Each structure stands twice: as structure tokens, then as C-alpha cells.
Amino acid sequence: MKLFCTPLAVCITAGLMLITCLILGLISQNPESQDFLSRIGLRSFKDSPWFISSTMLFLLVLGMFIIEQYRLHPKNTSPHLFTGIWVVVFGILMSNLSIQRYLWIGWKDVPKWEATLQSPDPQSKKLPFAIEVSQYRTDYYPPVIYIVDSKTGRVLPLEKPTSMPIDIAQYKEYAAGKGSAQQKQIQEWDIKLVEYLPHAWVHFTDGQYSAESTQDEGNAPAAKVEMKSNLTGETKTTWLSCGSALQLPSFLRLDSSRLIGMEDPVPSHFIAHLNLYEIQGDTGIIRLDSVWPNHPIGIDGYDIYLKSVKTEAGLWNPDVQLELVKDPWKPVVYGGLGLILLSLLEMLIKGLFCKKKQSND
């Protein structure tokens, strides 16, 4: 038994656990897959018998080592440090097995108490609080104009795809009469931006596109461009727009194999302002908070994350998707980390006192 209480045994089992985590991390995780890797437990980190077994073996050996250290060195600091590591790893293992993720989909100014458990068997659950979206805002990177192959959709030229991101600052100076218009050459076409509307509705009448600025639902960015061919001298003028869920995109066919259009805007930042309703006894409590990517908020043991943005609706997004994560073992992990920090602090203080004592002697 003493063989399992040695630092070598701890290092071997820790290495085995880390190698297992590395292998699982390199393999694409897809719990619903039915291939060979899934059958041997390598497609689901959460349910992998390899991860669970290697972690439990490490915890067993580390636990025996800690007990032996407390028996041999009861006044030493190192057992406390290893105990903190044990608590952290145990908390992570239990968290991995018991964590619950819920998907909440709601609409502006509509409180909702239910969320759907994300699992092979999705179930609706009533939450101890209601969530209402009071405001939702998405900021986008400037749209991009490009020429594509009308059959494959690939950006041209194929050997070096070239595009024209709209420079908002330059356009504002141009619109104010203080600068020149933005220009770009793609293949043989010289493209000039003459007008840009960040929120617009594009109409197609009598074979021509026209655009009007609007804040109505379904609006999309639109750009008016003038083009001239360096080969033939031909000129074209048109409005380009990526469109939205409520309006079709507008583009211009250059020839039988090419067209010029606008890429869908890419979100740069999005934020949701929430009203959270709780019932405590006979009273209701309203909490105002905001959530954005990588900045969750916590309530009643749940961490609320802003899940995603549906860019297919253009600048108009009819719903908000939140992910609610309930992890009852998170305080245990934090407690273990706190024990590790206290142990390191104790080791530092003892080291300073020993050094001071030696200097006095």
C-alpha cells in the first residue's frame, strides 16, 4: 500500500489523467455520434469512462498520499496544499458529471419562467425566476463588398480573393465634403462608394434599385456604388445590400459568371438588458442587469450567458437566446482554490520567518 502513497505514484496518475484530457481535447466531441470513437467513449468528455477512471485513480492515490503526509508531517504546510488540489480536482469531476445547461429563448418585453434542458431528451423546466428582455442591441463590423463566382459563390479572384470593406470614417468625411470617396479595384473593375445607408430598405422598380433610409424592422445596410471596367470602359451604378429576413439582397450581375454583392454583417458586440423577477415570500423583486459575451450574470445558483446572435435576420433580431448553467459544485472548486492560495501564503510566511530567524542567529 505504501507504494501508492509516494510522490512517484501521484506523478504517474496525474500524468495519466493529463494525457487522457489531452487525447479527449484533440478529438472532436460529438456525443450523438455513433462511430468507433464514440463507442469506446472518446466522443463525450462529460461521460467518457477514460476521463472518469483516470481522474478517480488520481484522486485515490493523491488522497492516500495526503493521509500519509498528515500522519508523518502533521505541522507541515504541504498536506494543506495537496488537499486543496484534491478538492479542486474532485469538484471539477463532480461538476462535469452534474452540470446542467438550459436554453432560454424569449422576446422583448415578454417575461418567461421556462427554459429547456439541453440534453438528448430536452425537457422544459420552470425556473425560480422570470427573465424579460428590456432592450437588445447588436453592433456590427462595416459590411464588405465583393465580386463572386455566380455558380460557386466563391470570392474572386480565386488566386487572391479581394474585397472592399466599407470605411465608415472615410465615407462620413466624403459625405461632409471634406474628403475623397472610397475606391477599390477588384479584377478589372474600379469600384467607388458614393452613398452608404446603415439602415435602409432597397426597392427594385423598372429594372433599377433604389434605397431609402429607415429604422423599420427588417432594415439592412445598403451601399450605392459606381463601377468602371478598365477593359471596356463600361460604367455601372447600382445599390448593393445584403438583405435581411424581410427583404431580399440586392446585387448586380456583371456578366454570365460573375456578380457583385454585399456580405452579411458580422456582429462585433452585442448586449442584452434584462429584467429578472424573483418571488420571495409574498413579495416580488425586480433586478436589472445586463449580459454580453463572456460576461455572465448569476442568480439563484444559475449563471446566465448570452448564447448567440441570429445574423440571418440582418439588423433585426426578433428573439434573444440565453444559456443558463447550473453548477452546484462550483463553490467546492472555489473553496479548493482558496485552500491552495492560503497554503501558498502560509508557506511564504513560514519561509520569511525562517530566513529572519537564521539571520538573527
Image (cartoon, helix red, strand yellow):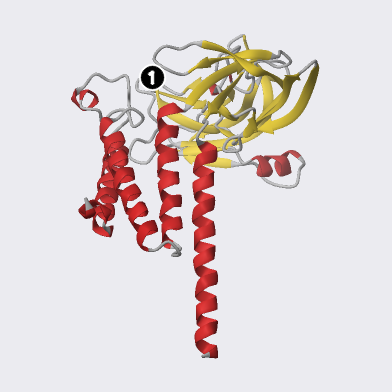
- How busy is the neighbourhood of tag 1: few (under 14 within 10 Å), some, or many (20 plus)? few
At label 1, which amino acid type do we have? Ser
Q: Nearer the viewer, residue 166 or 306?
A: 306
Q: Is residue 188 in sight in this rendering? A: yes
Which residue ends up furthest to the bottom in the rendered image? 361
**In x, y percent, where is residue 136?**
69, 25
Quarter of the image where one finds residue 265: top right
Figure disc tally: 1
Q: Nearer the viewer, residue 252 or 86?
A: 86
Which residue is depicted at the point 27% across and 54% down?
A: 5
Which residue is depicted at the point 62% across and 19% down?
A: 317
Q: Is residue 187 left or right of residue 345?
A: left
Which residue ends up furthest to the left in the rendered image? 36
**In x, y percent, where is residue 63?**
35, 48
**In x, y percent, where is residue 156?**
39, 33
Which residue is depicted at the point 78% across and 23% down?
A: 286
Which residue ends up furthest to the right in the rendered image? 283
Residue at numbered disc 1? 256
- 161 vs 102: above or below: below
Q: Nearer the viewer, residue 171 or 326?
A: 326
Which residue is depicted at the point 23% across and 54% down?
A: 2
- 230 vs 341: above or below: above
Q: Nearer the viewer, residue 339 or 200?
A: 339
- Tag 1, which secondary structure? loop
**In x, y percent, where is residue 14?**
29, 50
- 52 vs 241: above or below: below
Q: Is residue 316 left or right of residue 52?
A: right
Q: Is residue 308 in sight in this rendering? A: no
